[in-house]
Amino acid sequence: MYKNQLVLEDDKKYRIGIMGGTFDPIHYGHLVIAEQIRQNYNLDKVIFIPVGIPPHKRELRITKGEHRYLMILLATMTNPYLDVSRIEIDKKDVSYTIETMRELKKKYVDKDVEFYFIIGADAISTIESWKEPAELLKMCKFIAATRPGVTNSNMSSMIEYYKDSYAADIQTMVVSAVDISSTDIRNRIAGNRPIMYLLPEAVEHYIMKNGLYSEGNDE
C-alpha cells in the first residue's frame, strides 16, 4: 500500500499542514480536524506524522509504529489531500517536533513551502516545554483546533503570550465537534465493546485482524 507523494513544482507556492500525534489508533475525530482545516486554509496537503518515541510520554506504552502508520494509511487512502509520513517512526531516538520540522524544511529547501502545524487547543500551553520552542515558532505557523462552544481564556492568553514573546503566528479554528478519543477506542476493544462508526471500517478491520488493543496483546 502507498499513497502518491506531493510533487512540488518550482514556480508555485505550497501550503502544507502537519498533524503529529500517537494516533493509537487514528479515528474520525482526527480526520475531521485535518480535512476541515485543509479546506479552510486552502492547504495543498495535510501530512499525518505518527510519533516514534514521544519525549513527554516516554513511559507510555504505545502500539508499534508500523501498525499506527498502516492504520493512518488505510484511513487516508480515499483522500488524495491527506498523507502520512514515516519520518518519526523510522527514527531510533526520541522524536522532537523541531527536528522533524528541520528535516521537512531540508526536504523542500528548494521549493516555496509554508508549513502549518495543526495542534489541539489543549496543547497550546505546552509548547514552551517542547525542545527549542522559540525556533519552532519561527519555522511554521500554528493552527489550534477548538470545539464549538468551548471557551478557553487560558488558551487565548497563551496565544497572546507567544505572539508577544516569540512573534509567533498562531491562529485558532473552530472544528465540528467529534467526541471520539483513541483512549476510549482502546478501552472499548479491551472490554469487547463495539467501535463501529468511531473510525474508518478499514482501520477497524485492521485492528481486529491483528488483535490490537485486546487483553494480553502488547503490540
Image: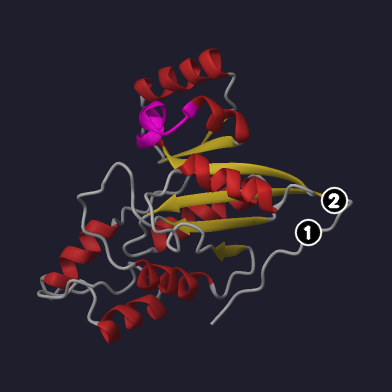
In the rendered structure, does residue 25 fall within the stretch colored magenta?
A: no
Does residue 18 appear in the picture of this structure? Answer: yes
Q: CA distance from mark 2 to mark 1?
A: 8 Å
User: Would you say 27 lies left or right of 41 here?
Assistant: left
Q: Quadrant of the C terminus?
A: bottom left
Mark 1 is surrounded, within 10 Å at the Cα level, by few (under 14), some (14 to 19) or many (20 or more) other residues, namely some
Quarter of image, res 30? bottom left
Q: Amino acid at mark 1?
A: Leu
> Considering only vertical position in the picture, is 215 above or below 25?
below
Mark 2 is surrounded, within 10 Å at the Cα level, by few (under 14), some (14 to 19) or many (20 or more) other residues, namely few
- Residue tagged 1: 8
- From this viewpoint, which residue is outermost toward the top? 164
Identify the residue at horizontal 57%, vertical 48% (top origin).
37
Instruction: Read off the magenta span.
Output: 122-133
Return the mark for residue 68: none
User: Would you say 160 lies left or right of 126 here?
Assistant: right
Q: Nearer the viewer, residue 98 or 201?
A: 98
Identify the residue at horizontal 37%, vertical 59% (top origin).
23
In the rendered structure, does residue 124 fall within the stretch colored magenta?
A: yes
- Residue tagged 2: 12
User: Would you say 54 lies left or right of 35 here?
Assistant: left
Task: Please state the horizontal and vertical placement of residue 42, each as a whole percent of the image.
Answer: 69, 49
Does residue 151 appear in the picture of this structure? Answer: no
